[in-house]
Amino acid sequence: MTQHQKMTKYRWTICALVFFATTVNYLDRAVISLLKPYLAAAFSWDKTAEIANYANIEIAFKIAYAIGMLFAGRVIDKLGTKIGYAVATGLWSIAAVLHAFATGTGGFSIARVFLGVTESGNFPAAIKVTAEWFPKKERALATGIFNSGSNIGAILAPLSVPFIAEKWGWKWAFIITGAIGFIWLILWFVYYEVPSRMAKLSKAEFDYIHADEAATAEAEPAEKVSWFRLLQFRQTWAFAIGKFLTDPIWWFYLFWLPDFLGKQYGLKGTDIAFPVAMVYVISSIGSIGGGYIPMRLINKGWPVFKARKTSMLIYAFCVLPIVFAQLLGGVNMWLAVLVIGLAAAAHQAWSANIFTTVSDMFPKSTTASVTGIGGMFGGLGGILLSMLVQKRMFVYFESINQIQTGYYIMFFICGAAYLLGWLFMHMLVPKMKRIEL
């Protein structure tokens, strides 16, 4: 590391790289939700079969993602952020392109399994990078910024995928979006290194990044910590249950919002692009703002954990208006888009903070593993929601031509999930207690 005295800000370049990776991650993930009508036409699915087959494909992704998250964190901790992140991104980009060669529900399910396993590496790697490159007071803001990449990916998908599908066919939508990950790989190897090896990083910035550790004399465990031992801590379970209850809601928006707008308001093809994009434009504001608020509270003297939990409670209440989405949508579709956007923004704000609780409570060497455990539970929650609600309930209400009732019930589930998640987290970890290994 070069001993420059002038304070550099290279950590924000690293944040931009992680933001780009997360954008690609969610772009590749969201493509299939916008191609559902094209796939139904290509494979001659009727309305009921379309929902059932799509739910099966989605469940295949979530099962693979949940399993992948458990192992991804361990792999990232072992390989390190530079190589681990590159391997994950390269493999999920290949998986995204391979969707173009699927010929039915089985083929798409296999492609989604490959995508789910490999995409699971993004967040464990991203959280570990943030813990390595940012002091505690900036981690929620940095997490909010890179996590807003999930919104940008979800914005780019409706603005590009229907156009590509109309112009060149649905297969090219998978190929073009999947290929973007290889551009990121080049930038990653050009610009990334861990702080201790980064020549462009000044001593002043290095000391700033590690100031928390100097003040608290944080000790890293000499040996790798097993999953079994990590699961003995209430802090691990607080994070895991919070993810279990709230991750499925974000996936519902990502995979089913185009279907809701199509069924509720008769939107098709490129007409769906702007309303879907608007939801994620609103949510991107919440992602960045969600990291800014606790940072402001911390700067005013609040304890880190109190600032984090207070902010999360505020965000949980901001989701509640979504229960009125269809009622407001009966007046004007854009009112429904607005309250869904508000709920999505609150989720992203919540997500920025729940991720940061891991680096608040655990040593850096275990952050990817704990993030992976929480991600696995988030995936399990998504699987449960898909199997009990989307596959069974949506198929039933579609079969009797009352799919709007299914969405009404789903919006009530969305409204309750975050307050329930906050309550469980508060009961498990009422006060900040850092893990010592």
Image: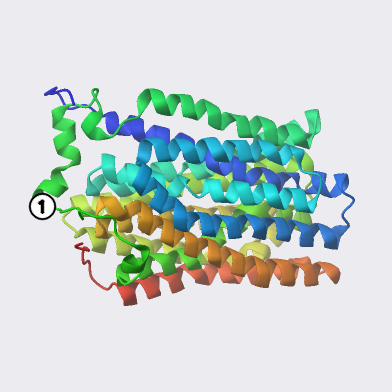
Percent position of residue 436, x then y: 19, 62
Q: Is residue 119 visible?
A: yes
Which residue shows up at 36% across the image and 69% down it?
Answer: 238
The C terminus - image quarter: bottom left
- Left or right? Give the position of 251 relative to 80: right
Q: Which residue is mark 1?
A: 217
Which residue shows up at 55% across the image and 62% down it?
Answer: 248
Q: On screen, 149 above or below 398?
A: above
Percent position of residue 398, x then y: 81, 67
The N terminus - image quarter: top left
Q: Amino acid at mark 1?
A: Ala
Percent position of residue 318, x then y: 46, 62
Dot 1: few (<14), some (14–19), or many (≥20) neighbours within 10 Å? few
Q: On screen, 87 above or below 237?
A: above
Percent position of residue 201, x then y: 22, 27
- Left or right? Give the position of 425 relative to 393: left
What element does badge 1 sit on? loop
Query: Which quadrant holds residue 154?
Result: top right
Which residue shows up at 84% across the image and 50% down it?
Answer: 40
Q: On screen, 260 above or below 270?
A: below
Nearer to me, 304 or 23: 23
Nearer to me, 69 or 330: 69
Q: On screen, 121 above or below 83?
A: below
- Left or right? Give the position of 50 relative to 356: right
Q: Residue furthest bottom?
A: 427
